[in-house]
Image: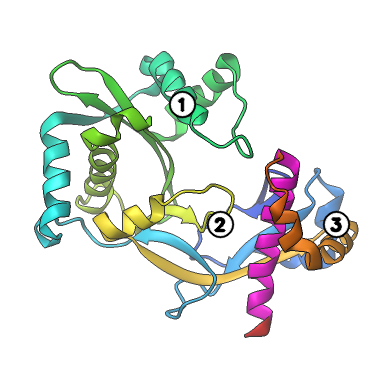
Amino acid sequence: MKEGWSIYNYAFLPTTAPHEEAEVDVLLEGKVWSEGKAFMARYTTDFDCGYETEWWYCIKDDPIDISKLKKKRRYEITRALKNIDVKIINPMNYKDEIFNNTMECFDEYPKQYKPNINYNTFSGEIKMWSQSAICFGAFLKNSGEFLGYAICFLRKEYVSLAHLKVPSKYHSLGTNAALVYAVCTEFLNSNKYNIKYVSDGARNIRHKTNFQTYLEKYFGFRKAYCKLNIVYRPFFKYAINLLYPFRNLIQLFGKQKHIYNLSCLLKQEEIHRSFKRN
């Protein structure tokens, strides 16, 4: 594996922080394609450029202050905190609860992108979290019932909010609000960590979710606009160019998982080409 890059879902992604420039010489030279099974590489430039683009990271770079929120939003968060305890946990101590919680959440996903997981494989991931992540668990105060969790990775100068899973039956309790508030106060309202921001990741075009909008509306997250760059393995670039004119038609048949994944790739390419027009 080339230094500074990792493979995820058949794509090379930089291991640098979103606000850092990726080392792209290995992509431009073409040598990277001899390693692994990646079909493409994706990276961003011009992070937090100050003007709107079609690509962004959802970040919060200031402390959370409930008193500055609108009355309704402030009420929903304070109500959640009255009913729910959130604490940093060792996920290995709640392995079964986390697995069952995750399965419930995945059961609510559309079949186009519903993950397939099993207990043994997922247990390995939970073990990895216990060694390299900061894990938050949400519990109902009067019973101690496990409601949901958040997994955060402390990176160089920022925190990645990588996973937050709460089954829909616990949404009305304000579990999402309690977890996000705990993450923000832990990392942005204390001096324990030398970070610039908490990131919920880049724009999500594969999962149909309003979570980033929720973060912006209730917790003051914002879009850090940037430029999306894509480099394809040569034969894969030819295939994308061939299929691109039919992207809207392909989208109509996106109920099948493989067709849906192709549609998302073409949507990503459309966003990529929007920067070439500017």
Span shown in magenta: 257-276
Position in image of residue 245 (x %, y %)? 80, 68
What separation in Å lies between label 2 and label 1 (alpha carbons)? Answer: 28 Å
Residue contact at pointers 3 and 1, CB within 8 angstroms = no
Q: Report the amino acid beneath label 1.
A: Thr
Position in image of residue 39 (x %, y %)? 80, 51
Q: Report the amino acid beneath label 3.
A: Phe
Give whichever of 187, 103 is nearer the camera.
103
**Which residue, given by chain and number where applicable, does mark 1 sit on?**
102
What separation in Å lies between label 3 and label 1 (alpha carbons)? Answer: 34 Å
Which residue does the image show at 71% across and 62% down from the upper left? Answer: 248
Q: Residues within 10 Å of mark 3 (few under 14, many from 20)?
A: few
Q: Report the amino acid beneath label 2.
A: Thr
Q: Is residue 47 above or below residue 250?
A: below
Position in image of residue 261 (x %, y %)? 70, 47
**Which residue, given by chain and number where applicable, does mark 2 sit on?**
16
